[in-house]
């Protein structure tokens, strides 16, 4: 059994999430395998963001290939290293822009999920502001040698707040953004909770009309569908100014843009994505990283995908050298290959040990039985078209649960049932999906996917790979 003692709340999240076929929010380091070069590429982008630059990456792969897993793993890593992170899934109600406020809905979702090391589960907006102001108050007290009840503290804190916000007033919407931050401080200083809550409402994009915002905060604009991304750039700069390394946005389920039936609306969303791409690539944004997950057809379909928008196709398409079979992880698109059989087998070993630890029993499954499970999974009817790591892992956790709660059943009996069943198709596929999946496990191991020698790893990358046992 695995000697590492994992907290019960983490084993619970891992067992329950994988049994349901979803990515857990915590504990990913205990089950991660492969993806070495992909992770190295993303970590280099994080270094650029921390140094004041910007980053944009499209993570593509078929359903169940590990896109969401990779995004979640990087999110957790970045949060622990001092970044502010926000994640959200696109859907028919949440897009990059839309006639019914779908872009603003995406902004609100990201703000709800705004997270830091001390608030990893979202809702970090107010705690960020409170921490910033508390740190300013402590600095003033230490520098001036005064106590917390000294009236001069408020004046000096106000001056330092204006120093930070004043630097942002030249940005698009920066003046009103700075004005609302000052209103939040006034609500604290004057003990006016209504003013403080109004400032938070505005920052979360919850005002419906300018009239209401002007009446309560004396600002002339509100965060709306057209301008929400400009405020994300402001949040990134603000985060860096108050002690964080930057802001990272993780936007998954990009395929929902591909599924927009109205061509004009779809092209409007692609145009918004082009704006984000250009800003991050051309240095128009700072301390901002944007990571988007989607399926291959979302990117490469020439009729409805990103490649249908010529400006994006010319920026995202593989070069002549990349299309010859080599891998270029420095480009804007990271194409995830399926995990190899060996990598999936290693993940099953880890899951077996976690399951044993969670339910406090000694493992009865030997290595040879895990190999038999893998062989059965990849050889059953339909596996060459439909089997993914997600399906294998979900079946395996289901087998472990069944064995544990039904002592009269045997591994061989359950394996026989698995062999006779067809591979389950992902319920995320739609009838018009055109990218037929490659054979499961047909890709090379990630340790040999890239031609040539492995890139030199910075110390922080080495630490990360060691932490995740990659």
Image (tube, rainbow, N blue to C red):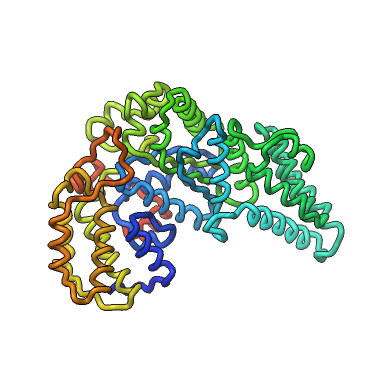
Q: Quadrant of residue 292?
A: top left
| Residue under the point 16% across and 72% down | 410
The quadrant in which the C terminus is found is: bottom left
Whole-percent x and y of residue 313? 37, 25
Which residue is farthest top? 310
User: In the image, residue 381 lies at what x, y percent?
Assistant: 14, 49
Q: Quadrant of the N terminus?
A: bottom left
- The x, y position of residue 152, in whole percent, is 86, 57
Q: Is residue 354 above or below residue 175?
A: below
305 or 242: nearer the viewer: 305
Depth check: 362 or 417 in front? 417
Q: Who's the residue at 65% across and 54% down the image?
A: 126
Question: What's the residue at 74%, 51% (across, down)?
Answer: 196
Residue 32 at what x, y percent from top left? 33, 57
Q: On the rendered structure, is 229 left or right of 357?
A: right
- Closest to the observer, 309 or 56: 309
Q: Is residue 203 left or right of residue 155?
A: left
Q: Which residue is depicted at the point 41% across and 48% down? A: 71
């Amino acid at each position: 059994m695995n000697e590492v003692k994992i907290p019960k709340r983490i084993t619970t999240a891992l067992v329950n999430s994988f049994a349901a076929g979803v990515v857990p929010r915590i504990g990913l380091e205990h089950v991660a395998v492969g993806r070495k070069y992909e992770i190295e590429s993303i970590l280099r982008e994080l270094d650029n963001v921390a140094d004041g630059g910007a980053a944009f990456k499209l993570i593509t792969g078929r359903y169940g290939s590990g896109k969401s897993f990779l995004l979640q793993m990087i999110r957790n890593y970045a949060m622990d290293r001092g970044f502010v992170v926000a994640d959200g899934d696109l859907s028919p109600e949440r897009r990059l822009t839309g006639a019914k406020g779908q872009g603003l809905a995406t902004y609100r979702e990201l703000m709800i999920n705004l997270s830091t090391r001390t608030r990893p589960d979202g809702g970090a907006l107010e705690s960020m502001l409170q921490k910033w102001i508390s740190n300013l108050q402590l600095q003033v007290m230490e520098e001036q040698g005064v106590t917390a009840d000294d009236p001069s503290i408020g004046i000096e804190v106000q001056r330092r707040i204006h120093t930070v916000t004043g630097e942002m007033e030249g940005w698009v919407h920066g003046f009103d953004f700075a004005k609302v931050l000052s209103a939040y401080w006034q609500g604290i200083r004057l003990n006016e909770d209504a003013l403080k809550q109004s400032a938070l409402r505005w920052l979360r994009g919850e005002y419906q009309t300018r009239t209401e915002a002007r009446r309560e905060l004396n600002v002339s604009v509100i965060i709306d569908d057209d301008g929400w991304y400009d405020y994300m750039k402001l949040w990134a700069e603000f985060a860096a100014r108050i002690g964080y390394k930057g802001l990272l946005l993780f936007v998954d389920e990009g395929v929902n843009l591909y599924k927009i039936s109205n061509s004009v609306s779809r092209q409007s969303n692609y145009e918004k994505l082009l704006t984000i791409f250009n800003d991050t690539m051309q240095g128009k944004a700072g301390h901002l990283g944007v990571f988007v997950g989607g399926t291959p057809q979302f990117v490469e379909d020439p009729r409805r995908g990103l490649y249908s928008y010529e400006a994006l196709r010319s920026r995202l398409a593989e070069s002549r050298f990349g299309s010859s079979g080599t891998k270029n992880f420095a480009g804007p698109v990271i194409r995830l290959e399926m995990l190899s059989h060996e990598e999936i087998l290693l993940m099953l070993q880890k899951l077996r040990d976690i399951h044993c630890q969670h339910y406090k029993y000694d493992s009865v499954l030997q290595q040879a039985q895990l190999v038999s499970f893998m062989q059965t999974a990849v050889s059953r009817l339909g596996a060459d078209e439909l089997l993914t790591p997600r399906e294998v892992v979900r079946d395996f956790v289901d087998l472990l649960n069944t064995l544990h709660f039904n002592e009269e059943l045997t591994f061989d009996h359950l394996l026989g049932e698995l062999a006779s069943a067809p591979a389950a198709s992902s319920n995320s596929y739609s009838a018009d999906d055109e990218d037929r999946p490659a054979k499961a496990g047909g890709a090379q191991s990630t340790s040999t996917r890239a031609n040539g020698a492995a890139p030199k790893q910075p110390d922080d990358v080495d630490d990360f790979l060691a932490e995740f046992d990659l």
